[in-house]
Amino acid sequence: MAGHSKWAGIKHKKAIVDARRGAAFTKLARAITVAAKEGGGDPDANAALANAIQKAKDASMPKDNIERAVAKGTGEGADADAIETVLYEGYGPGGVALLIEAMTDNRNRTGSDVRHLLSKHGGSLGEPGSVAYLFDKTGVVTVDAERWGEDDLIVAIDAGAEDIAQDDDVFEVLAQPADLAAVRAAIEQAGIEIGTAEVTQRPKTRVPLDEQAAGRLLRLIDALEDNDDVNAVHANFDVDAELLEKLAG
């Protein structure tokens, strides 16, 4: 599993930098709107909305922007009904499984864009159900394992976390998506600095890649994530952490 959590951390940092430039605010707002539309506007009763709002806050999205996005999802915005969530499944270089989450007002356009990007970068679009079984939807909080010990994270178990795993120099605290906010809060209240906290599709198994295949895969993922309609890309690859830093740099 070496390097996979580091990849998540690199993605998280990139997303924050992009968002502070304004490039990702649209995606963050769209995620809030869809969560509010599907589960209501109260984050205390809607875990998906609470997680979407927290991601927006992590990226320094202004409070007014967040409130407008929630209002749009609860019916005060006429265009909320036009947005739908779509999950694409496919394969990348090296046979890596890909789950591509999109939020779109035009399914045909987004599907065509995703298919084109996969083909251009050595991937292919799969049938529904072809790779989804390789992932578990999981709330994950990462913590620096060089700074904190596993015993420090017992508070997370008490708050509802299901497991604590170590991936290279990072602890992954695993929880049900609905429990992510409580687990994150417990860790932070204990004075422990977190790296990332998000609901993700966590791979059950991972495919090892050499430098060439990893480089091609990361270029594909970057291209997909740069698409305005793509909200997240999940992949079940395994790359050495040092190589990952080299490729990401």
Image (tube, grey):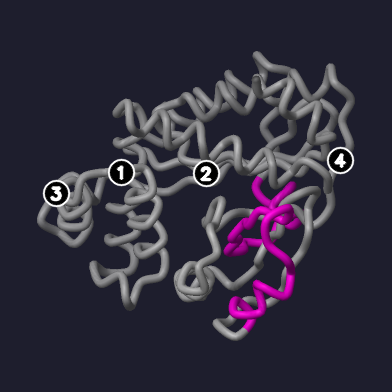
Q: Quadrant of residue 89?
A: top right
Mark 1 — residue?
60
Compute the Cα span from label 4 to label 3. Answer: 42 Å
Mark 2 — residue?
101
Residues in magenta, as a range? 128-157
Q: Closer to the camera: disc 1 or disc 3?
A: 1
Q: Is residue 246 left or right of residue 155?
A: right
Task: Check disc 2 and report its element: helix, strand or loop.
Answer: strand
Q: Position of residue 240 (x, y in %)?
A: 84, 34
Q: Is residue 153 left or right of residue 61?
A: right
Compute the Cα span from label 4 to label 2. Answer: 20 Å
Q: Closer to the camera: disc 1 or disc 2?
A: 1
Q: Is residue 181 above or below residue 213?
A: below
Compute the Cα span from label 4 to label 1. Answer: 35 Å
The answer to whether the residues at label 1 and label 2 have Cβ atoms under 8 Å apart is: no
Circle 1: residue type:
Ser
Q: Which mark is residue 86?
A: none
**Lower sequence index among marks 4 and 2:** 2
Q: Is residue 3 left or right of residue 64?
A: right
Q: Closer to the camera: disc 4 or disc 2?
A: 4
Mark 3 — residue?
64
Q: Position of residue 109 (x, y in %)?
A: 42, 26
Q: Residue furthest left?
A: 76
Task: Check disc 1 and report its element: helix, strand or loop.
Answer: loop
Q: Residue at x 27, y 52 (%)?
A: 33
Task: Check disc 3 and report its element: helix, strand or loop.
Answer: helix
